[in-house]
Image (cartoon, rainbow, N blue to C red):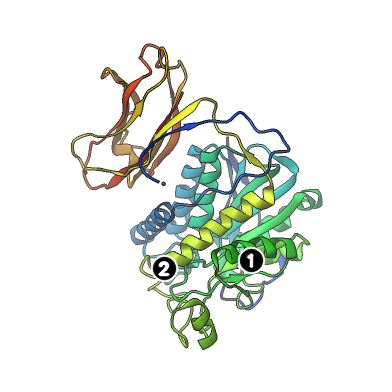
């Protein structure tokens, strides 16, 4: 969250822009897929957002800061590396991404915008978080927490192949800590016709504070109710957010007449005795005693708050975009048991047993892979058929420096008998990295 008590409005601070566009529940189960739902089918519930995945993004932000002088601030190499990481994840998941450049205080800044294909382009539901830290530290709660939750929710949209009625757009803002510079730049550059298409903007800034409160923005009644209803369903009381009014990236959208809402777990203000009784934690202590300081590290996170707020973000995005999820045709066999991948070691496998089918596997067998890893360039990945035939899905490529593999491959397995034990085989071919197979699924 920005240090400033309220947003500055001078457009003289906002200079030339450019867009660069690039084009868990035990283990094995068979799930019959449903046909595409008609338009009148009620919206399906949002998926659970994996806390493990969100924390993996935070760990990556922490490493980026450590590798780049200790921060991810505007104009520093750590900020650009953070943008590159998020962009690579989104590009791999099928989003259309764009980098919007701006200049502030003599340095180039970046906003990252990601659009999910489909939905009514005349009704855009927008969710965002600022990606920069202050210069004093890595900024893991402020605002790695919001950035990671928005990223993982976007990736969940991709994994579900969600088909919203509204168009979904996500953003990671630059230079928020210097006065909301990136988000103001974005809004100022929007034509009035484009502004009118945004049905709502959801902001997530500091959602894992270590002594947390549960605060909901009260700027738009529909968005506010959506969040409040979610927390009420958990039995978690909420309060109206006041500490951050005008101090985060929703402010430029609100000023432009766009409905806004969001979540917050508190910054430098102290938790009252009544709030401690309501939420737990320590009264008389700041919600985040490491606010804007060097101790805002991965240790400065309340995991329960981060998990609840990440799930609330997904709930709001699914609810307010009012769409449907169309499962792939056929039957899905899935193994969700974690399998550790030894560092520079022997190959490991995750298996699914397929039975009750006739004939051979399809010519377009869908192989869903979810691997959490700190350097996917070291990994080779194969699908192994029941007779032992291996189909290479991914070669090790040392130049592929991103982490994690979350994608669906298509394999011509028409020469294989469908029934039997199929395996996903993964091997780490180089040292100094860790990871696991999170899940493996086949869709016939």
Residue at image location 53% in from the left, 71% down from the top: 265
Residue 318: percent from left, percent from top:
62, 49
**105 or 171: nearer the viewer:** 171
Q: How many marks?
A: 2
Residue farthest along the left direction in this orientation = 345
**180 or 350: nearer the viewer:** 350
Residue at image location 37% in from the left, 11% down from the top: 415
Sequence-wise first label, 2 or 1: 1
Badge 2: how crowded within 10 Å, few (<14), some, or many (20+)?
A: many
Q: Which disc number belongs to residue 73?
A: none
Quadrant of the image occupied by residue 250: bottom right
Residue at image location 68% in from the left, 72% down from the top: 8
Q: Which residue is the site of mark 1?
A: 228
Residue farthest along the front direction in this orientation = 356
Image-based side of 228 in relation to 30, left or right: right
Residue 155: percent from left, percent from top:
51, 45
Q: Please say if 90 is above or below 102.
A: above
Query: Do tag 2 and tag 1 residues touch (Cβ < 8 Å)?
Result: no
Q: Nearer the viewer, mark 2 or mark 1?
A: 1
**432 or 84: nearer the viewer:** 432
Image-based side of 146 in relation to 52, left or right: right
Residue at image location 57% in from the left, 49% down from the top: 46
Image-based side of 196 in relation to 208, left or right: right
Residue 329: percent from left, percent from top:
55, 26
Residue 255: percent from left, percent from top:
75, 66
Q: Please say if 290 is above or below 316.
A: below
Quadrant of the image occupied by residue 260: bottom right
**234 or 84: nearer the viewer:** 234
Real-space Cα separation, disc 2 to disc 1, in angstroms: 22 Å
Q: Which residue is the site of mark 2?
A: 301
Q: Element at badge 2?
A: loop
């Amino acid at each position: 969250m920005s240090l400033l008590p309220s947003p500055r409005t001078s457009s003289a601070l906002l200079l030339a822009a450019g867009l660069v566009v690039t084009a868990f529940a035990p283990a094995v189960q068979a799930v019959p897929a449903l046909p595409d739902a008609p338009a009148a089918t009620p919206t399906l519930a949002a998926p659970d957002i994996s806390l493990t995945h969100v924390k993996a993004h935070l760990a990556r932000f922490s490493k980026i800061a450590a590798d780049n002088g200790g921060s991810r601030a505007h104009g520093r190499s750590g900020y650009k590396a953070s943008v590159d990481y998020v962009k690579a994840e989104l590009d791999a998941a099928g989003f259309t991404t764009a980098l919007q450049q701006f200049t502030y205080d003599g340095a180039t800044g970046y906003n990252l915008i990601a659009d999910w294909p489909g939905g009514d382009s005349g009704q855009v539901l927008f969710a965002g978080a600022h990606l920069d830290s202050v210069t004093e530290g890595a900024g893991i709660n402020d605002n790695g927490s919001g950035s990671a939750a928005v990223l993982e929710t976007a990736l969940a949209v991709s994994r579900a192949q969600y088909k919203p009625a509204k168009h979904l757009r996500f953003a990671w803002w630059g230079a928020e800590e210097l006065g909301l510079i990136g988000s103001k730049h974005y809004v100022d550059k929007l034509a009035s016709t484009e502004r009118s298409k945004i049905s709502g903007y959801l902001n997530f800034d500091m959602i894992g504070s270590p002594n947390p409160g549960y605060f909901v923005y009260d700027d738009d009644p529909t968005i506010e109710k959506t969040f409040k209803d979610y927390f009420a369903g958990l039995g978690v009381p909420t309060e109206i957010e006041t500490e951050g009014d005008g101090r985060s990236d929703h402010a430029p959208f609100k000023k432009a007449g766009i409905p806004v809402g969001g979540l917050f777990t508190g910054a430098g203000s102290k938790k009252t005795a009544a709030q401690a009784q309501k939420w737990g934690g320590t009264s008389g202590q700041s919600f985040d005693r490491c606010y804007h300081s060097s101790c805002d590290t991965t240790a400065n996170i309340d995991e329960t708050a981060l998990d609840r707020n990440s799930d609330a973000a997904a709930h709001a995005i699914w609810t307010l975009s009012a769409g449907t999820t169309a499962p792939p045709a056929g039957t899905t066999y899935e193994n969700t048991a974690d399998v550790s991948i030894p560092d520079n070691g022997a190959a490991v496998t995750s298996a699914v047993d397929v039975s009750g089918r006739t004939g051979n596997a399809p010519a377009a067998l869908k192989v869903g892979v979810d691997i959490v890893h700190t350097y996917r360039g070291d990994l080779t990945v194969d699908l192994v058929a029941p007779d032992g035939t291996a189909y290479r899905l991914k070669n090790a490529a040392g130049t592929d420096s991103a982490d994690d593999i979350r994608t669906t491959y298509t394999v011509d397995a028409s020469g294989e008998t469908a029934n039997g034990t199929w395996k996903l085989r993964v091997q780490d071919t180089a040292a100094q990295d860790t990871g696991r197979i999170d899940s493996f699924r086949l869709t016939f």
